[in-house]
Image (cartoon, rainbow, N blue to C red):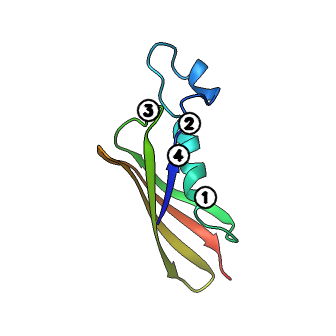
Amino acid sequence: MTTVHVDPADPVFAGHYPGFPILPGLFVLDHVRAALPGRRVVALDRAKFVRPVFPGDTLTVETTLTDQEDHVRCAATVSTGAGVVAEFRLRLVAS
């Protein structure tokens, strides 16, 4: 499990969206990737965004890895204090 504070001063909020700043989904996915040090993502099989992430939120990233024949499957859930914000299914290079 990894936690990440979403910095309200991040410049991404200036343009996404003015007057109603939310963290872009790609940034949420990038926090999942960062929670997998030493692993390389080769495919995104599923992405489900449930609710927005706001400036100042704290993200909790939980991952479960399952070995397959030629890759590793990763199930990731990203949450804030308000609940689940996103779920991902990734394929990683096998170790």
What's the residue type where badge 4 is placed? Answer: Val
Residue drawn at point x = 56 percent, y = 36 percent: 7
What's the residue type where badge 1 is placed? Answer: Arg
Label 3 environment density (alpha carbons within 10 Å; few <14, some 14–19, many ≥20): some
Label 1 belongs to which residue? 33
Residue drawn at point x = 53 percent, y = 34 percent: 24
Label 4 environment density (alpha carbons within 10 Å; few <14, some 14–19, many ≥20): many
Lower sequence index among marks 2 and 4 = 2
> Residues under labels 2 and 3: Cα distance?
9 Å
> Residues under labels 1 and 2: Cα distance?
18 Å
- Number of callouts in the render? 4
Q: Nearer the viewer, mark 3 or mark 4?
A: 3
Q: Secondary structure at mark 3?
A: loop
Residue 50 appears in which quarter of the rendering? top left
Left or right: 61 as drawn, with respect to 81: right
Lower sequence index among marks 2 and 3 = 2
Q: Secondary structure at mark 2?
A: loop
Label 2 belongs to which residue? 7
Instruction: Tell me the tag on residue 54.
Output: 3
Q: Secondary structure at mark 4?
A: helix
What's the residue type where badge 2 is placed? Answer: Asp
> Residues under labels 3 and 1: Cα distance?
20 Å
> Residues under labels 3 and 4: Cα distance?
11 Å
Q: Nearer the viewer, mark 3 or mark 1?
A: 3
Instruction: Tell me the tag on residue 28.
Output: 4
